[in-house]
Image (cartoon, rainbow, N blue to C red):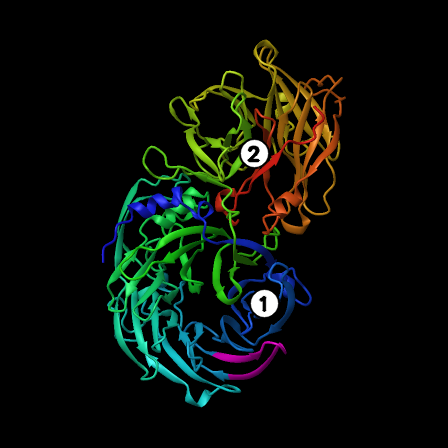
Amino acid sequence: MRLTRRALLLTLLATPAFAQDAPVFNRIATIEAFRMLPADRSGRSIAEIVAASGDGNTLVYVDGGQRGLGFVDITDPAAPRPAGFLALDGDPTSVATRGGRAYAVLDTSPNKTEASGRVVVVDIAGRRQEQACELGGQPDAATVSRDGRTLVIVIENERDEQRDNGRIPQLPPGNLTTIPLTATGIDCAALRRVDLTGLAAVAPTDPEPEFADVNGRGEAVVTLQENNHLAIVNLAEGRVVAHFSAGTVDLDQVDGRRDNVIRPTQRLAGLVREPDAVRWLDNERFVTANEGDMVTGSRGFTIFRRDGSVEWDSGNLLDHLAIRLGHYPEARSGSRGNEPEGVEVAQFGDRRLIFVGSERASLVSVWQDRGPGQAPAFLQALPVGVAPEGLLAIPARGLLVVAGEGDNPQTGLRSTLTIHRLGAGPAAYPTLLSENGAQGTPIPWGALSGLTADRSRPGQLHAVTDSVYAEAQILTIDATATPARITRSVTVTRNGAPAENLDIEGIAMRADGSFWLASEGNPERARNKTANLLLRVAASGAIEEEIALPEALAGTALRFGFEGVTVTGEGADEAVWIAVQRPWTGAPAGHAMILRYLPATRAWGVLHIALDRSPAGWMGLSEITAIGPDRFVVIERNNQWGEAAIKRLVLVSVAGLTPAEPGAAQVPVVARRLLRDMVPDLAAARGVVQEKLEGFTIDAAGNAFAVTDNDGVQGTSGETQFLRLGRLPTGD
């Protein structure tokens, strides 16, 4: 059935959940997977698939990095507690639960051609293994039938992506394995395998099954991902009763080029869906998350009927949602875009909800199934950890749990489980989104690295994007709306073309409505070295003047350079002030610089600012904002996430100081005092405290705002926190 999507497209902007009276999900807690480990926590710890005990009080998740099961006590879901770890003899790939037992499937294969695995039964309360049986192949997913009688295991026998460029067929073939559940565990002797070969046109000898779900009639729907195929299996009879291709989709107004610019202007035709996760909506319909794998993926999710007909397809909606919320992963534009992978379906009160996890966008979207023949209604989008893999709804407790598998011990951004609870609104996320541009598609944005305010209009701000994107953008933000809205974007240009080799980190509005921009240099690069530049830019984005550092300063520059810029005075009295992020060569230990540039005389001056110490990583400046002729607010932060994070607003005074000439032996040090510890503000979102607090400004009404930089969703969750701080006690 072909259904219109125009009305649904409009709801993504006009009527999201925060504008509705219905209950919404809000994140109430986040816990890192490594916290469940008993000893060394420095290695990779990856929360992938997550399940819950029968009473909903204990989470059980597979940790592929540590080869075991982690347990989390969520008796109080707003304060999750580590509840143990169980090492297993194999690589866990999935876990399902029934009552007080967990059924974990393990890959024990010595290589891709000698596939083997086992299922283990675990007593959740005792954190101990009770039983095991061999599966004869490599498992990838497990679920328990709705009647609680059967454990259903997808035996993938996955392909070797390094062999023949990952092409299939690669034997041995996978299958669907079923094992009866008993009062004491599983009946290994009654294990049965359902043959899935001979079904798909792509590689009939190598089905590559990926995921399965069971409906109320005892039928399992199975995705054969690399074959772009679906099969329905009658569990009682142990046979395939229907199968069909997942088909293709044509997409308009999407970004299909990996060029570090988000341009949703292309048409991509004939994209194979290659579904990953699948869930039944009822006994006649199911929904798939179309990740793609071998070819492209269609960047969306699809509602199928049991006969294989497509009832509804999301088309470009998930990509547009990711763009609108600043979560679009430009690095995946050439293949899978937001990359839907996980899907969950559950009944919350009188609403049947669909949750779709976009792995590369690190976003979960929530939809309401409105029944056969109708398009689902978009409700809201949820912030989660990096690369959401496992989605678990616990309707009896009003909870949604998301396991994010992205884990980087080196940066401190770790794999997490995020817990969301259904309750009264408003929705806390997003804090910032974009309206549609001239093409009728969302204005692209991300990696916000600087913030400034309009001098006369309260609530109107401007932000700038950094070198994550090949083309820098100046964005106009309406902060009078909730959430704040990006209403306009202009490209920074040089001689009429998008300016190259810039890393814009700071922006300041001048009295005439034009801007000063600070571009950070990187003289340490082996190639394509960039210089620290001060740019005078028209309101249209056109560069009118490029001002380089005098050699006495440029010769001391290191990688961490221009970071923030602000303005005092105007006309002949205009002064431009620049925050340099970290100490350069020749500066006293632990001191960064604040530079002054006088446009009227082209003179540079230098001041030093002492940086506090950080127990881990480095400390530096991220922003500077004038609050008077000789007083400023700077952001001082370290490069750490979570509990090691230090993020502050610091008041700086240059009263009575004369900036030194470049190269001078004696440089005055500015006075400083703490204005606000920003960690509580960032922690209030109940996620991981973010590293890059990079933008700060005070608007024409005296209200302060701050914003984080999401690094363009490269190795991060993509989350942007736009913070409303009200009037601060600056003493003015």
Q: Does the magenta stretch include residue 98?
A: no
Q: Mark 1 points at which residue?
A: 66
**Apparent side of residue 561 relative to residue 607 in the rendered image (left or right):** left
Residue 512 appears in the rendering: yes
Of tags 1 and 2, which is closer to the observer? Answer: 1
Q: What residue type is labelled 2?
A: Asn
Relative image position of residue 416 (x, y in whole percent): 57, 58
Answer whether residue 107 is visible to the viewer in this image: no
Label 1: few (<14), some (14–19) or many (≥20) C-alpha neighbours in 10 Å: many
In the drawing, what numbered circle is on residue 391?
none
Residue at image point 53% right, 87% down: 184
Q: Position of residue 58 (x, y in %)?
A: 59, 69
At mark 1, the secondary structure is loop
How many angstroms separate mark 1 from mark 2 (CA)? 38 Å
Q: In this view, does 276 lie above or below 131?
A: above
Residue 167 vs residue 158, the one in the foreground: 158
Task: Tell me which corner region of the image, top left, top right, bottom left or bottom right, holds residue 583.
Answer: top right
Q: Name the residue under label 2.
A: 522
